[in-house]
Amino acid sequence: MTTAELVSVFTVDGQGGNPCPIVVDASGMSASDMQDVARRHGHESGFVLPAQSDDFDATFRFFVPNHEMEMCGHATIGALWLLARQGKLPGDTIRISTRSGPVTGFISRDHNGEPSVQITQPAGKTVPLTDVQRDDVLRALAVGPDAIGAAKPCNAVTSRIKTLIPMCSPEALNALDPSAENVEAVCGRIGSTGLYPFAVIDRDARLFEARQFPRSSGYREDAATGIAAAALAFGLLDNGLVAPDDEEIRILQGRAMGRLSEIRVRIGFAGGRAVGCLLGGNVELMAAPSH
């Protein structure tokens, strides 16, 4: 049976984060084998394969219990962190092929040699929801219009489409308890892979909090969702909630699950235009290889 190592990505003070099984050598594994790993662990899982061309250093694939995903931010960060710790990377800049497109990983190290990882995501795009779509989402979340903030709900994407819903407060955010069936149904109707309600904690400090209710991953909620956080960063920019600069944006997630996580995003600009972002966070080893 395949060897998987369990890491937690986007941790806070060594705790919380999103658990993620990683197979650092998935050569010879079929798609069914990979999905079986995700099913056994009940989490998004990452798989490292040889590059298919000289343009890349590796190919990464990602599975949740129910299906394959085009991209998974925390699995990419977790896999690069493990490979860096094991001395299996060709350098500090890694070119990765994914189903969503090319991703570049950047490795730095602290004074003890412990690696830190950031990955690229393309510039985000946002599309406001119609009033009908907004009301549909609010029904799925079982809240009324008074529960949402001033920003306009929208679909946003860097690699996967997420639906951003501004909540009026962190308390309203963490009181949400939608059914998985309602989330899956409304995501299907609005073309989203997950609902990502968020709230402002400290606008001046660029600190926000969010929750992710995925469309059909095989579980109700994620403790930390890097791709959704990247999409949120561009939603915050478009709504004027962060200034157009490359200062760090911090997004907390997982509090309602008892797994508080922190995702860090920096938007890059060229000629005053957003051209992409860097996504990063802390990683901890949870368990030795399992089978």
Image (cartoon, rainbow, N blue to C red):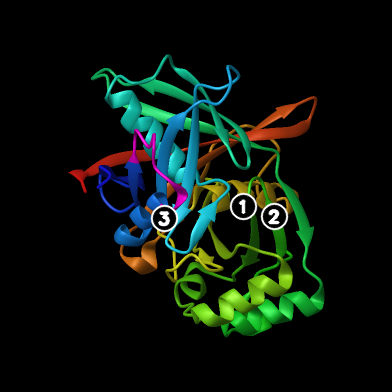
Circle on res. 35: 3
Tell me the SS state at disc 3: helix
Mark 2 vs mark 1, CA separation in Å: 7 Å
Mark 3 vs mark 2, CA separation in Å: 27 Å
Circle on res. 232: 1
Q: Which residues are magenta?
A: 23-32
Q: Earlier in the sequence, mark 3 or mark 2?
A: 3
Tell me the SS state at disc 2: strand
Q: Earlier in the sequence, mark 2 or mark 1?
A: 2
- In the image, taking residue 195 as reference, residue 271 lies left or right, namely right
- In the image, taking residue 178 as reference, residue 139 lies left or right, namely right
Tell me the SS state at disc 1: helix
Callouts 2 and 1 close, C-beta under 8 Å: yes
Mark 3 vs mark 1, CA separation in Å: 28 Å
Callouts 3 and 2 close, C-beta under 8 Å: no
Q: Earlier in the sequence, mark 3 or mark 1?
A: 3
In the rendered image of this protein, does residue 245 appear above or below residue 215? above
In the rendered image of this protein, does residue 129 appear above or below residue 269? below
Q: Amino acid at mark 1?
A: Leu
Dot 2 alpha-carbon crowd within 10 angstroms: few under 14, some 14 to 19, many 20 or more: many
User: Residue drawn at (63%, 66%), measured in percent from left and top?
Assistant: 166
